[in-house]
Amino acid sequence: MRLLVRHAAPTVDAPVRECAYLDALLDAAVGVPLRPAVALFGTYASRGRYGNALQWHIGLEPHDGAATLDWEDSIELKIVSVWRTSRGRIACDKLKVCDVSVDPRHKLSNVAFVLVDRVTRVVVGSRRRRLAGPLRESLAQRWDADPHFDSAPLFVESRGEGEKSAPAYYLAASWLASALGLDEELPGVYLFDSSQWTSLRADGGGRDPLVSVLDAHAMSERHRCPRCPGTLRMDAGKFESTGICAAAHTRGMGERCDHRGHIAVDGRRLGQIAACSMDEMLAGIEDRVEAREVWRLADRVPEPEDHLHVVR
């Protein structure tokens, strides 16, 4: 159920907040696969698991339910899952801002939106946005819009019932995509078919399908599984044209691959890499990283003596 907002609209621009260390971490995060870190802090079914993994990667506590902003109470971090539609456009889902008891104006004052591909769970970029100027005005002008009939950019959604209800603020997907300037040229973003994904999750007992990174030009209908001696079989023509395809895996190769859905992506369409190697990226996408092998981004990005904080 969607409800009207409970706080007043923003009437003044948020102050500028900047940090050179956070900027360096976000630049280095491009190409980081988040799946390996998820297993360290919760289950694959928990909400916010990839946000927890990102928090840990940049040196913060993975579980953070505080009303303060994530980075030194000056900049909020938000993961935005992105995917490519059948028309080639980049799309995203609605985004939780905060619990309804927290002022969304504060949470949205200065935000680092981290873009993560929906299929590979690899960081493909980030966008810094401040609740100021045209962005603030576009949100404020439709602040009280009806969430059911007027395409409200911000609304309260209540999940659950009775005492288990947890109302929270959300940004509408359409407004968010426009605010972030999502474009067709963003590399590393794959086509996502929600119905196919749901079917593959069902094959895996509710878990996301295992992803294999292959080369569409170097394969036929069969390819060696990167995790076991089995093979993956798929429609080679569809895979070459779309860069992604559901795959059938050889049975009898062990519980890890036998009881999961499978999907393959064309490795030639992966995005850029900053702080990890191609081997590390592939191992993370393909779920081939043991807990003892999980590396942390913050350990690879030197902290500057001066964070060059800007507040004005």
Image (cartoon, rainbow, N blue to C red):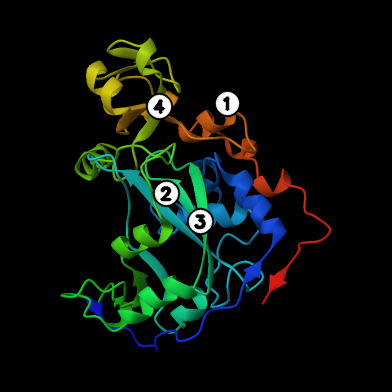
Cα distance in 3D space between marks 2 and 3: 26 Å
User: Residue 245 at x, y = what percent?
Assistant: 27, 28
Q: Relative to 140, is 79 above or below?
A: above
Cα distance in 3D space between marks 1 and 3: 26 Å
* Sequence-first tag of 2 and 3: 2
Per the rendering, the mark at residue 127 is: 3
* Residue farthest toward the front in the current orientation of the protein: 134
* Sequence-first tag of 4 and 1: 4
Q: Which residue is mark 2?
A: 44
Given this view, does label 1 or label 3 mark the residue nearer the observer? 3
* Sequence-first tag of 1 and 3: 3
Q: Locate the C terminus and report the quarter of the image it occupies.
A: bottom right
Residue 41 visible in image:
no
In-front residue for pair 254/121: 121
Q: Which residue is mark 1?
A: 279
The three-letter amino acid code for the residue at tag 3 is: Arg
Q: Locate the N terminus and report the quarter of the image it occupies.
A: bottom left
The three-letter amino acid code for the residue at tag 1 is: Asp
Secondary structure beneath dot 4 equals strand
Q: CB of mark 4 within 8 Å of CB of mark 1?
A: no
Q: Residues within 10 Å of mark 1 (few under 14, many from 20)?
A: few
Q: Is residue 83 left or right of residue 3?
A: right
Q: Which residue is mark 4?
A: 212
* Sequence-first tag of 4 and 3: 3
* Residue farthest toward the left in the current orientation of the protein: 149
Q: Is residue 283 left or right of residue 211?
A: right
Given this view, does label 2 or label 3 mark the residue nearer the observer? 3
Q: Residue at x 55, y 63 (%)?
A: 63
User: Residue 195 at x, y = what percent?
Assistant: 19, 43
Cα distance in 3D space between marks 4 and 1: 13 Å
Secondary structure beneath dot 1 equals helix
* Sequence-first tag of 1 and 2: 2
